[in-house]
Amino acid sequence: MLGPLVKGLAKTFEQLFRKPITIEYPEKKREVSDRFRGHPRLLRDENGRIKCVACHLCETVCPSKAIVVEPEAGETIHEKRPRRFVVDLTRCIFCGFCQEACPKGAIMLNRKYELAQYDKAALVYDKEKLLQD
Ligand code: SF4
Ligand code: SF4
């Protein structure tokens, strides 16, 4: 009769001295794996200029049509830059195709996973927001 009870208590006490497998989120945040894919962000070059040349490759390759790129008007073909660059995170599936396709290394997936918002519109990232991240 007492045997199973003692066994159960022993098991409970054993757990008290084990390293916890959970963390106190959100105070503590877990490191993501090297293969983790967050949402896309835009990069600047060493002169602080946006690297994107508005070639539309990422927009074309994106399987969920989450990217919209509009080049600035009046620029020469070699100096094209995006006037508007939008990534709709409500559509993005974090596949990384945009990063793979970009010939300029201008778009990269980041390592952020806290994307929850109350407002869906806040998940449509414009150029400025994509450059900040
Ligand atoms: S990660 Fe994939 S789904 Fe998201 S914007 Fe890039 S290509 Fe599109
Ligand atoms: S593929 Fe790269 S350079 Fe071309 S539009 Fe996309 S981010 Fe810009």
Image: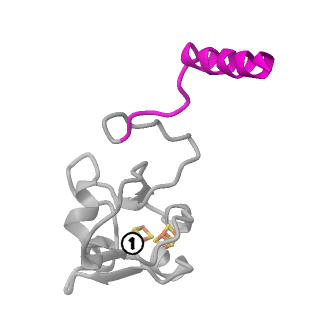
Q: Residue furthest front?
A: 1
Secondary structure found at label 1:
loop
Quadrant position of residue 29:
top left
Q: Position of residue 85 (x, y in %)?
A: 29, 75
Q: Considering the image in quadrants, where does the C terminus appear?
A: bottom left
- Quarter occupied by the N terminus: top right
Is 104 covered by the magenta stretch? Answer: no
Question: Which quadrant holds residue 26?
Answer: top left
Is 77 on the left or on the right of 122, as rendered?
right
Which residue does the image show at 42% across and 61% down from the upper left? 39
Give the vertical position of 3 relative to 49 (above or below).
above
* Residue type, label 1: Leu
In the image: residue 92, left or right of residue 72: right
Quarter-of-image position of residue 50? bottom left
Q: Is residue 120 left or right of residue 48?
A: right
- Res 105 visible: no
CB at disc 1 and ligand 1 closer than 8 Å: yes
Image coords of residue 116 (percent x, y): 34, 63
Question: Where residue 35 appears, x then y in whole percent?
Answer: 59, 46
Residue under label 1: 89
Residue at left offset 48%, top offset 65% = 102
Residue 77 placement (x, y as % from top left): 33, 79
Specify whether residue 28 is in view.
yes
Front residue of this view, candidates 63 and 90: 90
Residue at 32 percent across and 55 percent down: it is 43
Q: Which residues are magenta?
A: 1-25
Residue toward you, 14 or 91: 14
In the rendered structure, the answer to whether residue 11 lies left or right of residue 82 reads right
Between 123 and 55, the residue placed more toward the observer is 123
* Dominant secondary-structure state across the stretch colored magenta: helix
